[in-house]
Image (cartoon, rainbow, N blue to C red):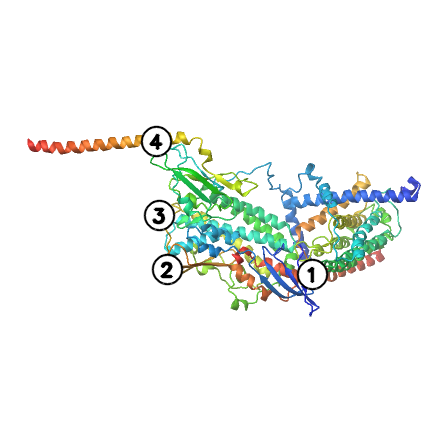
Amino acid sequence: MELLRQIFAGASTLLTGMRVTLEHFMRPPVTSEYPRERLEMSEAYRNVIVLIEKDDIKSHDCIACSACERVCPSFCIKLDGARPEGLKRMRVTEFTVDFALCSECGLCLDVCPTDTLGYSRSYDEAGFNRSDFLYDLVEPWRAEEETTVERLRKVENEKAEAKKLAAAKKAAAASEKAADPAEEKDA
Amino acid sequence: MQNSIEVVAEDRDTYYMNMGPQHPSTHGVLRLKLHLEGETILSAEPFIGYGHRAHEKMAENRDYLQFLPNTSRVDYLSGMIYNLAYCQAVEKMMAIEVPERAEYIRIIAAELNRISSHLLWMGTFLLDLGGITPFLYGFDDREKILDILDSITGSRLTYCYGRFGGVTMDVDEIFVAKTAEFCEYFRGRLDDFQRLVIGNVIFQERTKGVGVFDPELIQHYALSGPCLRAMGFARDVRKDEPYGIYERFDFEVQLGQRGDCFDRSTVRMGEMQQSLDIIEQALKELPDGPIMAAKVPKRIRPPEGDHHFAVESARGRFQHYIVSDGSDIPVRHKLSTPSFVNISTMPQVMPGTMLADAVAILGSIDIVVPEIDR
Amino acid sequence: MVHNLTQILGNPLLALAAAIAAIMGYLTVNAMMLIWLERKFSARIQRRLGPTEHGPFGLLQSVADMGKLLSKELLTPDHVHKPLYLLAPVLVFSPVIALCSLFPISESWVFHDFNIALVLLLAISNVTIVGIFFAGWGSNNKYALLGAVRSVAQNISYEIPLILSVIPIVLMTRSLSLYQISAAQDVFPFILVQPLAALIFLIAATAETNRAPFDIPEAESELIAGFHTEYSGMRFALFFFAEYSNMVIVCALAAVLFLGGWHGPLLPGWLWFMIKVYGLIILMMWFRWTFPRLRFDQLMSFAWIVLVPLSILNLLLTIVVIKLI
C-alpha cells in the first residue's frame, strides 16, 4: 500500500514537471538571430578605449601625460607626445593600445586628467593576426590635427593677451592708487 | 571523449580511471583519479593546477590599484562579489569611508551576482544528472541579470566595478525599475524551478542520501558556504563577520539537515530567495548622495603588518589575506577560496559511492576550478 | 479487402525487393524527419530556435548531417575484434526493417498479415540486444563493454513488463495478429479499458529504446560514452538510425495495441495511424527533455519492484474480468 502511495506521489511530480515544460513550449523563443538581428548594447558597455571629443576644444584633449600608461595593469598602452610650435600644451602623436592584452578595467579612464578617454560601443571586433589588435587611437584625429593646433594656438594667444591686459590694468590701478594719496599728502 | 585507464596487474578486480582534465562534468579542468571496483569507488584523488594563472604572484608585482581587474577573474561566476571584496579589504586597511549610496549599490550588485551564480550551478548540476532543460531556463534568467549589471558596469561576467571608496558608475531610475521588475519576475521562476527540478521524484532519488558530508569533516576541513549549511551548521559570513551594511538587512540563513546533495540544492534555492529579499530591501532604502568617497589617497600604502578581510561568496567564505610592508606593492596577497576546501573533501566523501553518484556529488558541491587553481 | 503486393507485382521476389526498398526509403526519411523534429521540439521547450539555416525551418539540416556522416572516414581501430565489431551495426539495424513490415498501416494495406505477428515482433526485436552486446564486446574497450552490459541488462529487465502488459490485449482479442487486433478496436480503443497496461507499455517501451530517462547506456555526461564509443561515420549513423527506427516501431505497436490502429473519424486510416504514431513519438521526446536520468540500480529496481508487480496485477485483473464477462 505504501508502495502504491509512493508511486502515485512520484508520478504526480513527473506530471507537474511535464506541465512546466509544456508551459514553456507555448512561450516564444528568446533567441535573437545574430548576425541578422543585432542587439543594442547598453550605454555603459565597455569595449576598446577611444579618444573622445571635448566640446571646448572640438577635438580630443590628450596631453600625453602617460598617467594611463603607468596605471594600466596589463601594460597595453604606448604613448608618445610632442609640443607643437607655439603651443604650451603637449599633444599626443602616437597612442597605441594592444587590445589583445586589455582587460577593460577602466583604470585608464579614471586617472586621465583631461577626461578624454572613453569606451567605444562596437562589439564585433575580429581579426586574423595579433597585429590586427594594435589600435591607433590618434588615427581618426590626424586629419584635423593641423586645424586643431591652429585653433589652440589662437586660444592660447588670446588667453595670453587677456592676461597681459589684465596685468597691465592691475599695474595701472596700483600705480594710480600710489599716486593719489601722495597727491593728497602734498595738498 | 576517451579517458585513459591503467589496469593494476596485481589486483584484477579493481581498476584506475581518470575523470580526466577534459570532461563534461568536472566544471573546468580538474582531474579526479578514481580507483574503482566494478562501479563502486574505492578512492578518489583530485589533481589540481591545470588552470593556474599565478594571480597571487601578479599581486606581488602590481600595486593595489592595478590588481583590481585580477579580482574578478579568480572566480568568474561571483566576479562582482570578489571585486567588491577586494575594494572593501583595501578600504578597511586604509580606513576609507564609503558613502551610503555606494554601499547600497554594492549590496544590490553582489546579491544579483549571487543569484546568477546559483542559477548557473543549478543548470550545470541538472545537466550532469541528465535533465538538459533547466540549464536553458536558468541561463535565460541569467541573461536578465547580466543585462541589468551590464547597464551599470559595462561588463557581463568579469566586473571591474568597485573602486577604493565607492563604485565607478551611478545607478539611475531605469536600473531601479528594471531590478524591481526582475525580482518580481524571478519569484515566479523559483516556483517553476521548484516544480520542475526540486520536486521531481527522479531528482530526489538521485540526490537524497548521496554524498553525505559527515559532521566529522568539519574537524579537518574549513568548510563554509552551502556545503556547511546543508549539514545543519548556521555559519554565514554576512551574519558572523558582517561587512558593508549587511547588519541592516533582514534575511535568514538557509539550513539543511543531512548534508547530502539534496540538502545542498535546497539550501542554494533558498539562498536565491533570500537574495531577492535583500535586493528588494536595498532598493527601497536606496539613499541619494555621492558614489565615491571624498578623500581617497592617491597612493595606497597600507600600514605594515597582516590584514585580512572575509566575505560570503556564492560558494562559501572567501578571504583576502594581505601582508604589507608599508610600500605600495604587497609582500604577499593570499586568496583563500572556498572551492579549494570543498574539493579537498572529495577523498573523504566519495569512497563507497557509485560512479554515477560521483558526478552528482561533484556537481552539488559547486566548484569553480579557476578558483581552486587561481 | 487486403491488397497483396505479391499479387500486384506477380513475382514474390520482386514483391520482397519492392517491400524492402519501400521500407528502407521510409526509414531513412523518417529518421531524418525525427532528428529534425527532436531538435525543433527540444528547442521550443528550451525557448530557443533550433536549426534554421539549411532549408526553410531548417528542414535540410538532417540532410547536411547525413552528408557529413557519409563523408567521414570509416575508421576501424586495430584492437577490435573484427567479426563482432563489423557485424554489430548490421545486427542492430536489420531487424528493424523486418519489424516495419508487420504493421497494418490502414485497413487495406499491410505487407503481410502474419497470424503470429505479435510474437514475431517481440522476438525479432530482441536481435537488436544481441547486436548491442556484440558492439560492446567486439569494441575491446572497457567503457563500451560496461555500456553494453548496462544496456543488455536494462533491455532484458524491461522486456518482462512489456510482454506482461501486452498479454491482456491478446486475451481480449484472442488473436496474435496485429491486423486482427487493430480491426477489433473499431468501437473503442483498448486504452480505455486497459489504461494501466498502456502506461506500463509506454514506460517499458521508452526503456527498450534507450531513451531518457532510461538512457544510461548512452549517457552523454557520464564517464562512459556507451556501447557505440568505437564507432564513427556511417557505422555510428546506423546505430543512430536504429534508435530512431526503434522509436517508430514501439510507438506503432502502442498505436496498434492501445490506440486503435487506423480507426478514426473523417481522415483516411493511414493518416490516423501516422498521427497516432508521431503523437506518441512526441510524447517520448517530451519525456526526454523534462526528466533527469535514473541511476542504473534505480532503473533496475524500478523495473523489478514497480513495473513487474503492477503488470502482473493488471494481468490478473484482466483474467478475472474476462472470466466474469
Residue marked by disc 4: A153
Q: Share a chain, discs 1 and 2?
A: no
Q: Secondary structure at mark 4?
A: helix
Type of amino acid under label 2: Glu
Marks 1/4: CA–CA distance = 84 Å
Chain ID, mark 1: C
Query: Could you tell me residue A94's position as x and y percent?
Result: 43, 38
How far apart, in angstroms, are the residues tagged by discs 1 and 2? 60 Å
Is label 2 on the same chain as label 3? Answer: yes
- Distance from label 4 to label 2 (Cα)? 50 Å
For the residues tagged 4 and 2, is the chain the same?
no
Q: Nearer the viewer, residue A3 or A78?
A: A78
Reading the image, the residue beneath label 3 is: B294
**Residue B175, image x, y percentages:** 47, 43
- Residue matched to label 2: B304
Indicate the position of residue B127 as horizontal and vertical percent values.
63, 53
| Crowd class of label 2 (few under 14; some 14 to 19; many from 20; radius 10 Å) | few
List the single residue furthest toward the left.
Answer: A187
Write down the chain letter for disc 3: B
Report the mark closest to the observer, 1 or 3: 3
Quarter of the N terminus of chain B within the rendering:
bottom right
Q: Are marks 3 and 4 on the same chain?
A: no
Distance from label 1 to label 3 (Cα)? 63 Å
Identify the residue under disc 1: C298
Look at label 3 and name its amino acid.
Ala
Where residue C217 appears, as percent x and y from the top left, is: 72, 56
Secondary structure category for the residue under label 1: helix
Q: Identify which amino acid the numbered label 4 is placed on.
A: Arg
Disc 1 residue type (three-letter): Gln
